[in-house]
Amino acid sequence: MNGLKFEQIRKILGAFLLVSLLVIGLCKPVRDFLTIPKQVVLFEGQHSLVASSVPVFQATSTNPSVFTVNAATEKEQPLAVAAHESGEADMVLQLAGFPVKKVNVRVLKDFKVLPGGQSIGVKLNTKGVLVVGHHLVQTKKGRLSPGEIAGIKVGDMITKINGQEIERMSDVAPFIQQSGKTGDPLDIVLLRNSKYIRTKLTPLQEKDNTAYRIGLYIRDSAAGIGTMTFVHPESMKYGALGHVISDNDTKQPIQVEDGQIVRSTVTSIQRGSNGDPGEKLARFSPDKEILGNITTNSPFGIFGKLHTSIQNGIMDRALPIALSHQVKEGKAQILTVIDEDKVEAFDVEIVSSIPQKFPATKGMVVKITDKRLLKKTGGIVQGMSGSPIIQDGKLIGAVTHVFVNDPTSGYGVHIEWMLHEAGINIYENYDHQKKAS
């Protein structure tokens, strides 16, 4: 009998505890407290809201010279930190005088870049020559492709022939004719999926012709247009496009040997519609002045160094940047060109943004809301990639891709990953201080 009563009491207590935990979990102050991050990163001079309201009676900084925290003496008071100088310290949260949580706060050195928006022409030279197709040679034995017989695939890069570096298409022809005359096969080194492969290729003579052929279509360069994203004034390093440049035929990323960027002028706009993305039609500027080089072609854009300073004529002062966790849903602007070479600001909305701890290309969804831009372009069009996104006076990222079925919207990349890819370390001063300590 006593055992039965004990079992009933145990069940009642269990149910009471379960209901109590559920009720506590549903309380807004508790939910806000649980959402407080373990780490906050911000720049000198910035303020950061840590939580909208928490049941904290006291919040202190272990190093007030690095950052200070508001005196959270009331339940509904927002919890925020103010950064003063670069360094690292902890924010200790206390409830009823007892420490309940510790938040690591990293303050980075003030950092600014010049926003872009200019239309640029892009010239890329490949590492070797790119195989973009096979063709059949009409020989006495029938139609054959020596390149295909040798196992060479579309997308392969020919980097060496008979031990000699290949840089241009014109480098290939002498080897072909010499091999045809001697009958010796060509010793070819290919770059395929970041791996080097060797193969032998024997050119074949065309029927009713003295010329020898390898049965391959090759290319050594590519060209296009895009938009400048940022320039780092101290180093003159830049970033543009926000996505990798791929070959039109192979659809594979181009392995860059070198390249140049030049000024370009938008001549007209091919308006986009559902299922049919539009395009900026542009030409390289007549002066053909080389603005800078291209050293990197990556999923985050093209990068290099400028030879001369450039201005966009609308925001020519350096702006601070926002880290991925600082980007908010809501209003923003993009800088881009839709007429000749005039950079203009257009309204957009950040539909969603993902705080990212590691580099990733698609970090936010952007929707064009500017009526004039929608009327002119239909939304995001090819050539707009790299257009810088500005929110609350900060550079937050760049437009990268358009949604095919909804050209008014597309993806954007967070600016910190483009800076990282450009070789610009926004954590540099912080890292030096940490090593010194």
Image (tube, rainbow, N blue to C red):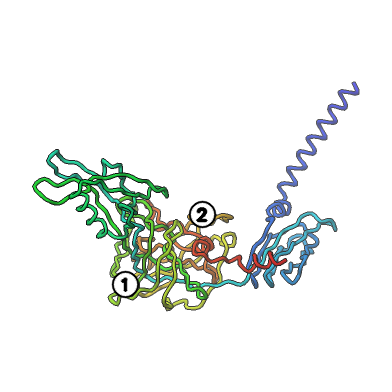
Q: Neighbour class for label 2 at 10 Å: few (<14), some, many (≥20)?
A: some
Q: Which residue is mark 1?
A: 265
Q: To which quarter of the image does residue 71 belong?
A: bottom right
Q: Residue furthest left?
A: 208
Q: Where does the image place residue 48, in percent across and percent down from the top left?
A: 65, 65
> What kind of residue is marked 1?
Thr
Give the side of residue 334 with respect to residue 288, left or right: right
Give the side of residue 63 with respect to residue 269, left or right: right
Near-viewer residue (149 or 223): 149
Judged from the image, the secondary structure of the residue bearing numbered disc 2 is loop
Q: Where does the image place residue 434, in percent across and percent down from the top left?
A: 69, 64
Q: Residue at x 55, y 68 (%)?
A: 321
Q: Where does the image place residue 163, in percent across and percent down from the top left?
A: 33, 53
Q: Which residue is mark 2?
A: 360
Label whose residue precedes the other's in the sequence (2 or 1): 1
Near-viewer residue (212 or 286): 212
Judged from the image, the secondary structure of the residue bearing numbered disc 1 is strand
The C terminus lies in quadrant: bottom right
Q: Neighbour class for label 1 at 10 Å: few (<14), some, many (≥20)?
A: many
